[in-house]
Image (cartoon, rainbow, N blue to C red):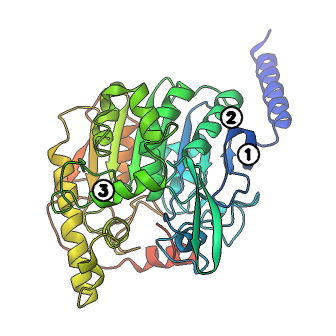
Amino acid sequence: MSLRTLIKAVGASLLCSLAAHAAYFKWEAIELPAASGASCGNGSPYRFFVNRTPFTSKTVVMYEGGGACWEKGACENKAGVQLGAVNPNGVPSNYMSDIKTQAHLGLVTPFTTRINPFTAVQTQSWNIVYMTYCTGDVHVGNTVLAYSDEAGAIAWYHRGSANVKAATAWMAANMPKPAHLLVTGFSAGGTGATGNYAQMRHGLKPAKSALFADSGPLFWAPRGSTPEQSPSLPLHNRIREAWGLDGPKGIVTELFAQYPDAGDVNNLGTLTSGLSKIFPNDRIGYAMFQEDGIYSAFSYEKFFPEIALAATPAARAAALNERWRLDINTTLAHMPLSGNLGYYMPNYRAIKKSHCLSIVTFGDTGIKERNLEGVGSFVDNLLDTSGAYVIRAQEASHTQSPPNTLIDFIARLIGLSGLL
């Protein structure tokens, strides 16, 4: 066969393949059956979205952020408050194209667009999976609770972990085994990416794999400590109970039963380092700002009355940040020296109260003292297969950079006003 004939044959085969799979390069809604245990918080079907390519098996999985809840008002979130549950009415089939959703057109993050007008990242040529968020449990719950107030009672399905299990099974059955897998997420999705990494890693069996968890930390908080020592301890205790984490089918119970070396079942923060031990060939990375004013509010405000009673907004922000920095530094102090485990922590960005490095754009996330231009350098390092150590960078400067009006305008334009 001549080279020209071979090229024509390959081209024809490729065209036939593309025609046979009309879902390539566009968002495909995958609705999981109720029999799988998957559900949104209000009991409606859980849908996630896939944007496939025929040119690679490499896959990026993005966990969506958006608040959390353990009471009726915050779960229903009728007022659309920032720290309440996102998508309380479920996920429609046109979620990725509806202008009213935070994910529309994939512009919420550079990881979910093929051609991004603001930031390029190598995973834009990969298969893209968007794990929507509608359960109010940072993607890790597995229980059904009855919540009530003066207006009545509701059943709420904290099914985040069950959704991930069912989505992973669907991906394993319907997509090629990834040559390279990146599991990532922002805010509540950063927590979900960390909590579900082992489950997804085990189910998809990629040749190479990495975790990039953005601004949804599981801080060091042993049950035997105090809130003064471990400010996240009251939050961890609350979500363990509310979301069934320690139940027979809870994510903590199942994770530590399958992977005893993942850490200490009485300290959720041990999983932050534990993933690097149970997957020594994977690359594990965490990112957050040191002046995050949103996740810190979610973590501490309901558990420390003095924060809500602060005399001024500045005093409130200072009280939040004092605890946030304590949690950061305690967690880093317990992080083992492992070449496959790292972090990226600039001080501040003037967008969304310095919350999330990977929403909208990677811009204004540099650490100048380390000659790192932005979080994109950290992502590239996580995806590096040469064996280089994962970056560990914590900005020493506590100065705040001036607002970037372009980034702020873009964030408002694409509807990120209520993001957690």
As shown in the figure, which amino acid type bears the numbered disc 1? Answer: Ile
Pointers 1 and 2 in contact (C-beta within 8 Å): yes
Mark 1, secondary structure of its residue: strand
- What x and y, as percent, mark residue 90? 69, 61
User: Camera-side residue: 269 or 250?
Assistant: 250
Indicate whether 96 appears above or below 312: above
Residue at numbered disc 2: 170
Q: CA distance from mark 3 to mark 2?
A: 37 Å
Corner quadrant of residue 157:
bottom right
- Mark seen at residue 30: 1
Residue at numbered disc 3: 373
As shown in the figure, which amino acid type bears the numbered disc 3? Answer: Glu
Q: CA distance from mark 1 to mark 2?
A: 9 Å
User: Camera-side residue: 153 or 35?
Assistant: 153
- What x and y, as percent, mark residue 52? 68, 40
| Residue plotted at (47% across, 62% down) | 359
Mark 2, secondary structure of its residue: helix
Corner quadrant of residue 347:
bottom left
